[in-house]
Image: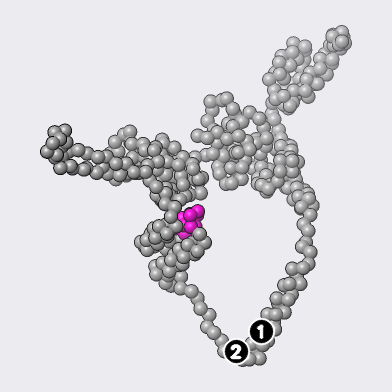
Amino acid sequence: MNILNSNEAFAAMMAGRNIMCRAIGELIEFTDIDQFPANIFAKPGYEFCIKVETMELAGITFAKPLTPEDVAEDQEIFIVHPDHISQVKYSKQCMEYFASVRNGFAQADKENAELQLQAIGDLFGRNIFYPPTIDNTGKTKKRRSRKTEEPAANNQNSTSNDVEEKTFDEAIETDPVKLVEKFTAQIAQFTNTQDVLSFRHVFLANGHLDQKDQQHLCKLTEDKLLELDPEQYTPKVEPANDLSVDELKRLQEEAEKLIQSQKDESTEQPIQVDEDAVYKELLADLLDRVANATTPAEVNAQIKYTKSWTEEQRKPLIDAINKRLVELNPPKAQSSLAVRIQKAEDLTELDSLEIDVSACDEEIQPRLMKLVKKRRLELDPFTAVIGEP
């Protein structure tokens, strides 16, 4: 589990991730962020994490497999194979890694990769022997090749059972000609349009192909789509109409007028947008919504409209949200303790209440202490005067 600070957590939430929170140094579990006030990201003493979504297969619960959107270049991932798990650094240029993530056979950590492999085995009634092999060398292991040598007449140490083991590194192809040949063969093997559309991302993201090669491969994918689904991907050709000479002249004149008008418009000064005025107008509207909100959820919801704002721009709204949350759900401890202080019957009871004040939130302690001093003066004016410096 990756622990995030407040800035990282807020950025992740703005990107659509589910965030959880807890107090730093406590052993309690993380709780969904919607259980905290809107200004939790501005408060010290809290830590955050991204909520991991899970799924269940064959009675085993594990994290949902990674998607291409979840993985960054050179990120460490764990690929689930039928007989082992590979620990690799992700690269979009490696078709094997990309296909594993796209097809749902990659996890962000070893534990969930093992659970997924076990679930797949249980689903088909197979036993996966543990611990599974972890290949973290970034290499693809190929079968051993056995080399049998002819026994030499003058060499008594040579045998026919000599074995040569070879391990080959997985090379990333960089030759444009070989890449085009490889991608061309893969396109020809596709049997459904979804695979063809997804494969465009692979060769368009390859940094070893120039624009001409990419255009060539795009043309191959268009031909393949036409082959697999002619009805959907056949170009629509509009029927030609027979136009008279006069009509052609008229159309040409209108086209020239349109081009000229566009040139004239392009020379005009662009309209300047007063960003400060827009900000003030939106802030006023959000402050009004907060003031009229009737539930804490409705109050907190207004923060989502400030994704592009700076911390300074967002501060007035957060202050208003905190104020409204207190109005909707005032702290019971503060009002109850204040009443008890004001109604204290003697100095002994007042001393006991003063101890309770020290355990309250630091923000309300000064106000409660003023009430304590005022009541002490009311109960024993003489002693209070003597004790003053």
- Residue 7: tell me if it is visible: yes
Give the quarter of the image for residue 59. top left
Instruction: Identify the image quadrant of the C terminus.
Output: top right
Residue position marked by numbered label 2 in the rendering? 243
- The structure residue drawn at horizontal position 81% and vertical position 17%, both measured from the top left corner, is 373
Q: How is the image coloured?
A: one colour
Residue drawn 65% across and 89% down? 247
Task: Verify CB contact (< 8 Å) between mark 1 and mark 2.
Answer: yes
At a point 39% along the width and 67% down the height, the residue shown is: 228
Please report the bounds of the magenta region as a residue range: 198-209
- Left or right of residue 122: residue 79: right
Q: Is residue 114 magenta?
A: no
**Is 324 in front, or is 189?**
189
Is 200 part of what is drawn in magenta?
yes
Q: Residues within 10 Å of mark 1 (few under 14, many from 20)?
A: few
Residue 98: image location, x then y, percent? 43, 50
Q: 260 or 68, which is in the foreground?
A: 260
Task: Name the residue tied to disc 1.
Answer: 251
Give the x, y percent position of residue 280: 78, 49
* Amino acid at dot 1: Leu
